[in-house]
Structures are given as structure tokens and as C-alpha cells.
Amino acid sequence: MKLLKKVSLVILVIGYLIAGANHFRAPESYFRIIPAYIPLPKLMNLLAGFFEILFGLMMIFKTTRFWAAWGIILMLIAFVPVHIDMVLHAPFQLGSLYVTPLIAWIRLVVLQPLLILWAWWYANKATAGI
């Protein structure tokens, strides 16, 4: 189990670093999915990318892993309105991905909870250090 948790941590760190960097590399994709009622979409995109990178880096270190895991959990919860909006507006093109209603629903009810659970695995002070 310890090896699985370490491998999982490496994948999680790399995933958040790549996802965060993508907010800066291809911001137009994110502008499209930020709901109209959220103010300052360009700033929100930059903040999302910044915090994904920050939390990904914080996950590397045992001393900050607990806080990073909770930061990721809260960030993913904050992203739920975006996924609800995607369900409401599917189908649409998002970069090279055609988001069908099924894909939008899977992102909302399967992927988002799994990502939250994944971060939660590291959100216990006793076991966050692996």
C-alpha cells in the first residue's frame, strides 16, 4: 500500500503541475468554460493555474502535504459550478475535445469526486507523510 500511495503521489503532483501550467499555456480553453456569472474570468483562470501549480509543488514536501491536499479539495469543490455549467451547455467544443453531455456528466459525478477522494487520501496529518 505504501508503494501505491507513493506512485499515486507522483502522478498527482505531475498532474497538477501540468494542469496548472496549461492554464497559462492555453487560457482560451478555460475562458470558455468559466460561467458568465463568475467575475474576472481571466484572473480566475490565472488564479486556478497558480494554485494548481502551488498545491502540486506543496504535495511534494511532507511538511506541506496536508495543507496542499486540503487546498486541492477546496479548489475542486470551488470548480463544481464550472462542471455544472458544462453539463448545462454541452455539447460544445473545448480545444480539441468535443464535450458531449455524457462527458460533462462524467466529469461532474465521477471524475470530480474521484479527484477529491484522491487528494483526501493525503489530507490526514498522520498518513500525509507516507
Image (cartoon, helix red, strand yellow):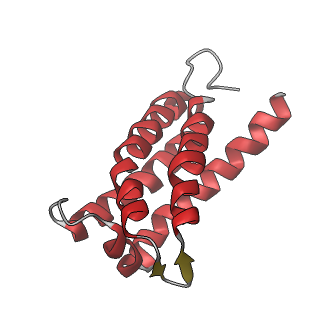
x and y percentages locating residue 6 in the rendered image = 76, 38
Q: Depth check: 99 or 51 in front?
A: 99
Residue for point 63% across, 48% down? 12
x and y percentages locating residue 18 in the rendered image = 56, 65
Residue for point 44% across, 45% down? 76
Q: Is residue 26 above or below residue 106?
A: below
Residue for point 15% across, 61% down? 39
x and y percentages locating residue 8 in the rendered image = 73, 43
Residue 61 seen in render? no
Quarter of the rendering occupied by the C terminus: top right
Residue 46 seen in render? yes
Q: Is residue 35 left or right of residue 71?
A: left
Q: How many marks?
A: 0
Q: Depth check: 12 or 38 in front?
A: 38
Q: Is residue 12 above or below residue 2?
A: below
Specify the quadrant of the image occupied by residue 71. Answer: top left
Q: Is residue 4 above or below residue 54?
A: above
Q: Depth check: 27 or 81 in front?
A: 81
Q: Is residue 4 left or right of residue 100?
A: right
x and y percentages locating residue 116 in the rendered image = 54, 38
Quarter of the rendering occupied by the N terminus: top right
Residue for point 78% across, 44% down? 7
